[in-house]
């Protein structure tokens, strides 16, 4: 976090278009992977430096260049110079805090997204800033770290499966976006399981630890919403685009991704409402528990008030009290106290007050709770 704040402060002192990396440097390997293909041919290899990418500029085939390591600003700037990418776009590519967005620049289109994956060890979301730039014969994707969700797309290109090698770079860009959006459903499934588990735990044994878990999930949901909500605007701009680099067939497929995005956003909003409901459930459950405790204490105090009064009367130190001289007075008073306590308890039972004392655990036993999965 300190490195990120320092980068932001340094960036504010520079002119617009200055490429300054903003993020947490992972120190990972910087790589350039190239996949060049057409319906008849396929080539895949790793390049040693950005200058080698010039051979793929202006070809008759479709070239996919995947750059890993946006912290290397010199590499990103050189890629921008080779393919004519505007300095403001280069500036956005190396700023991993930037909001997802869609831009058209005549001969090419720039898209920024958040690639989200689930970390099973830490049980939290792992976000990654991804930028996609595509023109009439190329697609360039920029990532922060090695490893991504695009292996299925690569395999389809290798196997010449489907229509991907018969289409242009716009279809490849669509495929990458579709992969990222599809993975949002997997993230939502994890959230659905966590929310259902949290709700069950609060039903059974509400505690402050559950409230802390709830606030952690709410913070993650806020981040998830910020990452996913702009995707709708991106796809909407994609669909409205009049650029010649985007075909009508690709727009047809994009409508399906747009529908998925709307579905994801609705699921996120429903989860946020569920979390608010769970918090209300916790507060209600805590209030019910407190009321039950107060009811028990009130009954105890009520039962022992008359015996306390009688015991205090005969505990006075007056010499002339007739009952003090009775041979069976002590036992008579004990019996009277027992009758009074038993009578009051019998009265409470007849009224149903003792039967109504139940723990908060039983208040919602009739509800059937099922794990909540994100709809697809």
Image: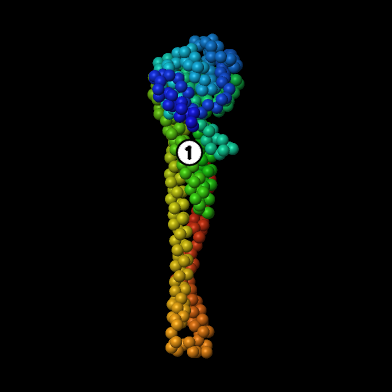
Q: Where is residue 288 in the image (x, y as percent from the top left)?
A: 45, 58
Tell me the crowding category of disc 1: few under 14, some 14 to 19, or many 20 or more residues within 10 angstroms, Cα based.
some
Give the residue drawn at x 45%, y 29%: 5
Q: Which of 236 and 252 is in front in this view?
A: 236
Q: Position of residue 268 (x, y in %)?
A: 45, 39
Q: What element carries label 1?
A: helix
Q: Where 368 falls versus 140 (above or below)?
A: below
Residue 47 visible: yes
Q: Which of 45 and 296 is in front in this view?
A: 296
Q: Where 135 falls versus 98 (above or below)?
A: above
Q: Where is residue 153 in the image (x, y as percent from the top left)?
A: 56, 24
* Image quarter of residue 112: top left
Q: Which of 226 and 76 is in front in this view?
A: 76
Give the residue drawn at x 56%, y 39%: 123
Give the residue drawn at x 45%, y 89%: 322
Q: According to the image, what is the colour scheme of the structure?
A: rainbow
51 sits left or right of 294 in the view: right
* Image quarter of residue 244: top left
Residue 102 visible: no
Q: How many marks?
A: 1
Q: Position of residue 341 (x, y in %)?
A: 49, 76
Q: Where 187 falls versus 131 (above or below)?
A: below
309 sits left or right of 183 in the view: left
* Image quarter of residue 266: top left
**Residue that carries the numbered disc 1 in the rendered image:** 220
Q: Where 295 falls versus 206 (above or below)?
A: below
Q: Which of 212 and 158 is in front in this view?
A: 212
Give the residue drawn at x 57%, y 24%: 28
């Amino acid at each position: 976090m300190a490195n990120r704040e320092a980068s932001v402060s340094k960036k504010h002192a520079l002119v617009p278009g200055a490429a300054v990396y903003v993020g947490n440097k992972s120190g990972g390997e910087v790589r350039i992977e190239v996949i060049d293909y057409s319906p008849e041919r396929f080539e895949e290899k790793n390049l040693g430096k950005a200058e080698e990418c010039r051979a793929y500029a202006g070809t008759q085939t479709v070239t996919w260049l995947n750059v890993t390591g946006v912290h290397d600003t010199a590499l990103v700037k050189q890629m921008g110079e080779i393919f004519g990418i505007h300095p403001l776009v280069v500036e956005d590519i190396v700023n991993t805090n930037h909001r997802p967005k869609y831009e058209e620049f005549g001969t090419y289109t720039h898209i920024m997204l958040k690639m989200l994956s689930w970390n099973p060890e830490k049980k939290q979301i792992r976000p990654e800033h991804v930028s996609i730039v595509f023109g009439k014969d190329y697609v360039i994707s920029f990532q922060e770290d090695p490893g991504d969700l695009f292996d299925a797309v690569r395999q389809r290109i290798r196997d010449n499966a489907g229509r991907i090698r018969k289409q242009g770079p716009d279809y490849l860009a669509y495929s990458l976006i579709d992969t990222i959006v599809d993975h949002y459903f997997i993230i939502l499934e994890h959230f659905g399981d966590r929310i259902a588990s949290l709700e069950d735990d609060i039903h059974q044994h509400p505690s402050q630890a559950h409230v802390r878990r709830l606030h952690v999930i709410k913070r993650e949901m806020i981040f998830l919403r910020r990452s996913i909500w702009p995707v709708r605007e991106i796809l909407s701009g994609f669909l409205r685009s009049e650029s010649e680099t985007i075909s009508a067939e690709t727009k047809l497929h994009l409508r399906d991704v747009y529908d998925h995005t709307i579905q994801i956003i609705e699921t996120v909003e429903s989860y946020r409402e569920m979390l608010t409901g769970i918090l209300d459930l916790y507060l209600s459950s805590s209030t019910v528990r407190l009321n039950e405790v107060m009811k028990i204490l009130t009954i105890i105090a009520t039962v022992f008030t008359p015996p306390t009064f009688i015991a205090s009367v005969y505990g006075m130190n007056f010499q002339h009290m007739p009952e003090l001289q009775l041979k069976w007075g002590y036992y008579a008073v004990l019996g009277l106290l027992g009758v009074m306590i038993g009578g009051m308890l019998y009265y409470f039972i007849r009224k149903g007050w003792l039967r109504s004392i139940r723990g908060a655990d039983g208040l919602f036993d009739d509800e059937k709770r099922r794990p909540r999965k994100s709809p697809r």
